[in-house]
Amino acid sequence: MMKIEENEIDRLARCDCHTHPGYSIDAKGTIEQFILAAVERKLQKICFTTHIDLDPNRSAVDKFIRYNGRLYVLDSSIVHHYIDDIAGARKKFGDRIEIIYGFEFSYEPHYKNLIEQFIAEFEPEFAIGSVHSIDSFEITAHKSIDIVTRIFEPFRFVERYYDFVLSLARSGLFDVIGHIDGFKKYLSRYWGLSNLEQIEMEILPAIAHKIAETDTKFEINSSAFRKGFPAPYPSAKTIEILLDADVPLGSFGSDAHRPEDVGSLIQNAANYLKGII
Ligand SMILES: [Zn+2]
Ligand SMILES: [Zn+2]
């Protein structure tokens, strides 16, 4: 397996690189509240990754951003509020914690160019790319997962999912791949976790070697622990496949959607990783 040193794990675990302040449609809490929570947890850095979904097929449901508690259709003036908010927080708290400006983008190949334009316009310092839907069917929410299981066979699904992940990595737009095996959370109830892991072991190694040829890394997302799972995203087998193929770990993230969860269980995720390397 690719070597990752314990002190490198400790260094990465000092940043919560995946947080959703109240700008994301399903999150609450101000930038300032998130920062104060991060300072309290003794984090060295916090990266804000407001969720951006540019899928034209999903614009009626996903293309929103929240500002001062209200939902707006995503437009550049609100993104500028977000940027100004972070800049203001840096002036106020910059001597106590490093603050990074970023986004988590939903990714599918058919709107890659829209993400590219967005990144060119707003120049984030950090970008997570996450596959939240396949063919515009959401795979990380209860309400649509039933449809997904009727459209796809498990093998075909996992294959298509990882094709999209490879496309994401090859796009060169993102620093890290978000919660790479997060699809298991919803689909294991239908298709069985061990079945999905078996399929993943057949498909992922070849994909992982191709991801390793790009500059895109993977994140370890501790939100799975909060939902009662015994492992983060990705779990041990997936991490092994990625590290074996020399895909580097890029970040840890809590996926906090409220201040209380900033930095939460990142240390557990770091310990989990140390336990398997
Ligand atoms: Zn996500
Ligand atoms: Zn997220």
Image: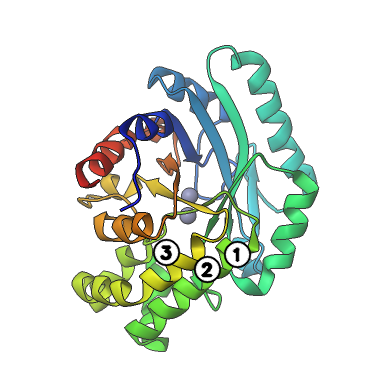
Mark 1, mark 3: which one is toward the viewer? 1
Q: Which residue is mark 1?
A: 170
| Residue annotated with mark 2 | 166
Q: Tell me the colour scheme of the image.
A: rainbow
Name the outermost residue toward the top: 95
**Disc 3 to disc 2, how far (Cα)?**
19 Å
Q: Is residue 207 left or right of residue 153?
A: right
Q: Is residue 184 above or below residue 104?
A: below
Identify the secondary structure beneath mark 2. helix
- The type of residue carrying mark 1 is Arg
- Image vertical order of residue 67 relative to residue 183, above or below: above
Instruction: Tell which of 110 and 11 is nearer to you.
Output: 11
Other-residue count near label 1 (Cα within 10 Å), few / some / many at <14 / 14–19 / ≥20: some
Q: Residue at x 34, y 45 (%)?
A: 3
Question: Can you see residue 235?
Answer: yes
Three-letter amino acid code at disc 2?
A: Leu
Residue 229 percent location from the top left of the image: 23, 52
Identify the residue at image location x=36%, y=76%.
Answer: 203
**Label 3 CB less than 8 angstroms from ligand 1:** yes
Residue named by callout 3: 140
Q: Mark 1 and 2 residues: CB-CB less than 8 Å, in contact?
A: yes
Please provide percent x and percent y for residue 16: 45, 34
Q: Is residue 47 above or below residue 37?
A: below
> Disc 3 on helix, strand or loop?
loop
SS category of the residue bearing label 1: helix
**Which circle's residue, 1 or 3, is located before the other in the chain?**
3
Looking at the image, is mark 3 or mark 2 nearer the viewer?
2
Which residue sits at x=20%, y=50%?
A: 230
Q: Amino acid at mark 3?
A: Thr
Q: CA distance from mark 1 to mark 3?
A: 22 Å
Image-based side of 96 in relation to 271, left or right = right
